[in-house]
Amino acid sequence: MLSSGVFDHIDVWNKAANAAWLRDTAIVNNISNGDTPGYKRQDVDFEGVLKRELGRSKYVSLDEKVSNLHQNHLNASIYTDSASYSYRLDGNNVDPEQEQAELVSNRIKYNGLIDSMSKEFARIKSVLK
């Protein structure tokens, strides 16, 4: 079977969009639990996973790095952020203003990823015509 690599970038963008969606869920959950005593904020670190995977291939172009990625290693998961840190007396470490800013930033990132995928599919479609 021939592998053209046409969808390599799209696959990575898809994984990133899934991680952004998961992060959106975590942030909304943080905002919802902003007044829950003892609650620790949660987050998703897809960027760290992607950076680690891309860093495994040194001295090659980004296109080569993306085509050599193991897609099954690009799975993001929710983790508890700063579990032992809290600036509040009730043990909750959610800063509502920070979470709102993170939510807006994450949604901009998600929309950019979806837009990039849509444009790439449009380019592929125009080549196939």
Image: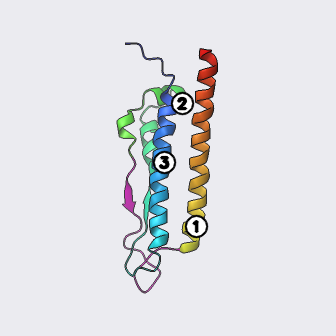
Answer with mark 3 or mark 1, whichever residue precedes in sequence.
Answer: 3
**Secondary element type, mark 3:** helix
Q: Which residue is mark 3?
A: 47
Q: Callout 2, which amino acid?
A: Leu
Assign a secondary structure to mark 2. Answer: helix
Under mark 1, the amino acid is Gln
Say whether residue 80 is magenta.
yes
Q: Earlier in the sequence, mark 2 or mark 1?
A: 2
**Color encoding of the figure:** rainbow
Label of residue 23 in the image: none
* Disc 3 from disc 1: Cα separation: 20 Å
Q: Secondary structure at mark 1?
A: helix
Residue found at x 60% / y 59%:
104
- The kind of residue tagged 3 is Glu
User: Which stretch is magenta?
Assistant: 76-95
Front label number (2 vs 1):
1
Horizontal side of 79 relative to 127 (left or right) equals: left
Q: Position of residue 111 (x, y in %)?
A: 60, 47
Residue to which mark 2 is pinned: 62
Mark 1 lies on residue: 100
Q: Is residue 9 above or below residue 28?
A: above
Horizontally, is 60 left or right of 39 in the view? Answer: right
Residue found at x 44% / y 31%: 57
* CA neighbours of label 2 inside 10 A, class few (<14), some (14 to 19), many (20+): few
Mark 3–mark 2 distance (CA, rounded to whole Å): 15 Å
Label 3 crowd (10 A; few <14 / some 14-19 / many >=20): some
Q: Is 86 covered by the magenta stretch?
A: yes
Which callout, 3 or 2, points at the residue further toward the start of the chain? Answer: 3
Residue 61 seen in render: no
